[in-house]
Image: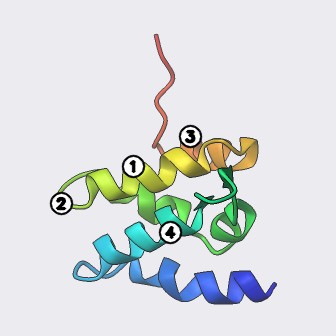
Amino acid sequence: AERAGALAPRVSLLRAPEPARGAAGALRNLSYDAEAMMPVNHVEIREAGGIPPLVALLHGETACTAAGALRNLATDAACAAAIRSAGGIVPSA
């Protein structure tokens, strides 16, 4: 719960054009623990509503950063479903 409280302000920044890249980068970094080499905070980011705005950022200047965050989040089945639902993962033909 404490982590979700810390992540929610970053998620809200995804909706503002200027700080969106920084917020997406922060969520990318917060979704993977490089030292432990494992995903972290996926549930908290998803529950804070971070996935739809990250998907929306896949176009334009923030695309690479948002894609990195979504790549980390997609390792979790519930997050992958949320990404798919938001239009970020298109089923292959």
Residue position for label 2: 61
Depth check, mark 4 against mark 2: the one in front is: 4
Kindly report the distance in space between the C-alpha atoms of the residues bearing marks 4 and 1: 11 Å
**67 sits left or right of 73 in the view:** left
- In the rendered image, residue 13, in percent from the top left (x then y), is placed at 40, 83
Q: Amino acid at mark 2?
A: Glu
Relative vertical location of residue 91 with respect to residue 29 in this rendering, above or below? above
Sequence order check: which comes first, mark 3 or mark 1? 1
Residue position for label 1: 67
Sequence order check: which comes first, mark 4 or mark 1? 4
Kindly report the distance in space between the C-alpha atoms of the residues bearing marks 3 and 2: 22 Å
Q: Amino acid at mark 1?
A: Ala
Residue 86 appears anywhere in the view: no
Asked which secondary structure carries label 1, the reply is helix
Label ID, residue 48 = none
Q: Report the residue at 48% width, 16% height from top.
A: 92
Asked which secondary structure carries label 3, the reply is helix
Q: Quadrant of residue 1?
A: bottom right
Relative vertical location of residue 64 with respect to residue 90 in this rendering, above or below? below
Q: Report the residue at 60% width, 70% height from top.
A: 49
Q: Residues within 10 Å of mark 4 (few under 14, many from 20)?
A: many
Sequence order check: which comes first, mark 3 or mark 4? 4
Residues 65 and 92: in front is 65
- In the rendered image, residue 29, in percent from the top left (x then y), is placed at 50, 66
Kindly report the distance in space between the C-alpha atoms of the residues bearing marks 2 and 1: 11 Å
Kindly report the distance in space between the C-alpha atoms of the residues bearing marks 3 and 1: 13 Å
Kindly report the distance in space between the C-alpha atoms of the residues bearing marks 4 and 2: 16 Å
**75 sits left or right of 89 in the view:** right
Depth check, mark 3 against mark 2: the one in front is: 2
